[in-house]
Image (tube, grey):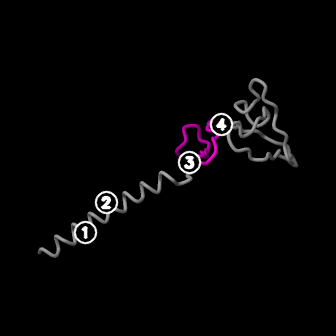
Amino acid sequence: MRRAAQLGLMTVQGFQLQGMLLLLDASTSLACTAVGIGREVSSTGYPMVTHSEDGELATNDIRLIRVPRKRWPAGSLRPLYYYEWGYPRIVSSQHSPETAPVGDQQETEPIGH
């Protein structure tokens, strides 16, 4: 019986140690969060996907941006932008109203289509 109690205590201490190590590692990790919502559970009936940068070495653009749905003609090309670290990640009134230029910001030039 004593041996079983010792093993139980070691298991609890092991879990505590693992939990502490996990928390210590979490504070130094570079993490992201992605969320996907299917059309069956969304209030609008449309699927939604979002992603956030939770902790990188540079200041992040942490704005939650809504990119409106568009219907493009066949053969249309989407502009591609170089990923900028920090704020603002992209300045483009074509991309979304929330990424339109503010103050003296200049539109980001696409690197291709």
Q: Which mark is residue 16?
A: 2
Viewer-proximal residue among 36 and 92: 92
In the image, what residue type sits under mark 4? Answer: Ile
> Label 3 crowding class (10 Å Cα cut-off): few <14, some 14-19, many 20+?
few
Q: Position of residue 94 (x, y in %)?
A: 80, 34
Residue type at tag 2: Gln
The residue pinned by badge 4 equals 65
Mark 1 / mark 3, whichever is N-terminal: 1
Residue at point 70%, 44% (across, down): 85
**Closer to us: 67 or 109:** 109
Magenta-drawn segment: 41-65
The residue depicted at 83 percent of the width and 44 percent of the height is: 79
The residue beneath circle 1 is 10
On screen, residue 63 versus residue 28, left or right, reads: right
Of label 4 and label 3, which has the lower sequence position?
3
Give the Cα separation between the discs numbered 4 and 1: 48 Å
Among the two numbered marks 3 and 2 on one chain, the one whose residue lies closer to the N terminus: 2
What distance separates the C-alpha of mark 1 from that of mark 3? 37 Å
Q: CA distance from mark 2 to mark 4?
A: 39 Å
Q: Secondary structure at mark 2?
A: helix
Other residues around mark 1 within 10 Å, as few (<14) / some (14–19) / many (≥20): few
For label 2, the crowd category at 10 Å Cα-Cα, with few meaning under 14, some 14 to 19 and many 20 or more, is: few
Of discs 4 and 1, which sits in the foreground? 1
Secondary structure, mark 4, is loop
Q: Cβ–Cβ below 8 Å for labels 1 and 3?
A: no
Residue at 18% x, 71% y is: 6
Q: Residue at x 85, y 47 (%)?
A: 111
